[in-house]
Image (cartoon, rainbow, N blue to C red):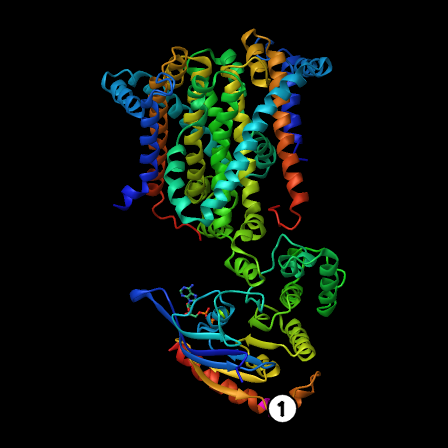
Amino acid sequence: MASCLDLRAVVMRYGAGPGAVNALESIDLAVEDHEFVTIVGPSGCGKSTLLYLVGGFLRPTAGSLQLRGKEIAGPGPDRGIVFQRYSLFPWLTVRGNIGYGLDEQGMAKAERDRIVDEYVQLVHLEGFEERYPRELSGGMQQRVALAQTLACEPDILLMDEPFGALDAQTRRILQDEVRRIWRRDTKTVLFVTHDVEEAVALGTRIVVMSARPGRIKEMFVRGFDVGDGEEFEADPAFAELKLRIWRSVKEEVEAARA
Amino acid sequence: MRIVPLLLLICAWQAAASFGVLPKTLLPSFFDVAAQLGAHVRSGEIFGHTAASFARAGAGCGIAVAAGVALGLIMARMRAVERAMEPILLMIYPVPKPAMIPLFMIWLGIGDFSKVAVIALACLLPVVVATFNGARSVDDMLIWSARARGTSEARLLWRVVLPSALPQIAAGVRTAIAIAIIVLVSSEFISAEKGLGYLIFSYGGVGADDAMLAIVIWLAALGYFLDRGYLAGLRRVMRWHAFAH
Amino acid sequence: MPLLTRFLPIAVILLLWEAVSRTGYVNPNVFPPVSEILLRWVQIFWDGRIYPPLWDTMWRALAGLTAAIAVGVPLGLLMGRVRAAEWFFEPLFSFGFPLPKIALIPLYVHWFGLFSLSKVMLIFTDCLFPIVLFTYHGARGLSSVYLWSAQSRGTGRVRMFWRVVLPLSLASIYDGVQVAVVVAVLVAVVTEMVSGGGGLGELMIRAYRFGDVRTAFAALLTVSLAGYILYKLAQWLRGRLLFWHVAEV
Ligand SMILES: Nc1ncnc2c1ncn2[C@@H]1O[C@H](COP(=O)(O)OP(=O)(O)OP(=O)(O)O)[C@@H](O)[C@H]1O
Ligand SMILES: [Mg+2]
């Protein structure tokens, strides 16, 4: 059976000549349907690059990226992406932003508004539909970005440190929401983070990347279910997995510094 | 509160005139000027001239904004157009635009065409430059985000590049409006049968300083309120943008 | 080679222009070939006809500009550091900056006569606004750290202006001067076009009256080039005088 996403020997180099940066070196990764894959690694190891390649924004220097057996040729609504920085359209309201992709599909207004309302509810932003991004807090903006992405009903969700810039509390709440949404729709998710705890709390599989040039160093499968509440945090298995992954990441962070 | 210094200045002016410190031959009193302005407004004479002037400035500025925004956007998205236009714009840049008035009068006559053409040319550069810079500095993430949600390359210009460049375009247009008024007055001083510049010049020519200053103040006030109105309009239309102060 | 391709578009336009006006479809006295314009340009430099008006325009522009710097910089610094001065002058200059000072030409002619003085005064007035405002913003935005540091070393209030405020505001003052240079040349030409008295502006108006497009064009090229050189000179001076200044990113 073909995987949902299949990366083979992907190499990515920025620029050419002596100034070139080897961002990724020979990445092999297969992601099955309904998997939640989290990617951790030191800063600058190429995590964003990997996601941009899957998104189709960048071309790999070598190797192949296939989505359901077809080579990725460019960006498309089948892959929804939430960027590291807020990337809402500042001139559109919350409603306009969430409905953006639907507008682009040429959907009728009534239908569009119905769907937008549904996603507004999903991310708990009722009452803020007519606000502009600058009138929202960082956490609310990232919720809008999530709803904007989900509203296009992508096959696969790409998230690049979506909560990196948020405070710890907001981040926890949004993590729970993402997990809830994933369980509800059982979408396929590729989620980049540098936070090991987040990686374990969300991912069914955790990929650790090496310092630049990025390679896949190790993979961990989370054998237990975390459920919907916070109980998993008291689970010794959770703490143990977290520690193992952190040790693996730490080596790379130190290697990156050296 | 910020109007107090201006009021003080006007009071000093009137006081100096009333106490005879400032001879009438040098500067008419503020009240005389105000009375002239009142008379001009009451007779309605001033409105025809205002309309003539603003039609010229508006036409010139309008052409410049339409052409400038289109050109700036295309230059920002298409390297070839940028390469072709850049040296041409660089060449026009140092030309003091009002100095082109005599040439345009030869080419297009002394009527409205030559004035509108010079105003349009003078306003074009700030609009093109602002649009180009705005469109060039569009956040890549926004473009990617739109592409990932199914926006085609052609629609990108309309859906993402233009709105994101809008704050800078608006600032460029504001500069263009100020320039338009300067070039307008210059061109009406040089040749016109109607318009506020013509009125100022002809009153000045016959030594009617109070009437002349009345029109100068009228023009300044219109220019000021135009600018304020423009800014207020922007704030309403672009509620999404965080303006400086 | 890259320089050549860069200016290719201009070359194409000039060639087209030349070709069109040589076909005879347009009146060569209204739309003369470029080559003839350039020839006239060389000619008026060669026979010296351009120097008196060029000199007139340039000295007026520079005199007005110099006076504006002499008055505007101290005033701007004062506004930046003294509350009362800021309260009174800032609204006046902010209000007046976008207004067309050109409209005062008839009044200035009445006050200062038809000749150079009225022109220099108007140039002075027009240049004063950018210089005052830029200086003010520079002096106002200074980081207090510098002032405190100078104070703690015993610098007095008046010396502070000289030794600390002025040097730290220089970058901003120069930005104002850059703007004023452009304004000075522009206002010089406009006043000459409107009220005569020699200079490149009057030369152009006279050329227009005689329907002499070639001379009008040559004069326009001269003004543009002179303005450009002045601008570049100011830029160069700025670099020399502000060698210690690191542009803030
Ligand atoms: N456009 C680019 N041009 C040149 N080099 C780039 C470019 N984008 C990224 N790089 C380099 O590629 C490497 C990987 O960058 P990437 O943004 O993918 O890292 P990351 O793992 O997402 O880091 P972070 O955790 O800080 O977001 C970095 O060393 C970076 O300097
Ligand atoms: Mg990144």
Q: Position of residue A132 (x, y in %)?
A: 67, 55
Query: Of residues C218 and C156, which is closer to you in this image?
Result: C218
Per the rendered image, the range of residues in magenta is: A235-239
Q: Position of residue A161 (x, y in %)?
A: 55, 71
Quarter of the image where one finds residue A135: bottom right
Horizontal side of A88 relative to C124 (left or right) equals: right
User: Which residue is depicted at the point 53% across and 61% down?
Assistant: B144
Q: Magenta stretch: residue A238 in it?
A: yes
User: Which residue is depicted at the point 51% across and 53% down?
Assistant: B138
- Whether residue A21 appears in this view of the structure is yes
| SS state under label 1 | loop
Q: Amino acid at mark 1?
A: Phe
Q: Position of residue C127 (x, y in %)?
A: 47, 28
Query: Of residues C11 and A89, which is closer to you in this image?
Result: C11
- Which residue is identified by label 1? A224
Query: Of residues C125 and B242, which is closer to you in this image?
Result: B242
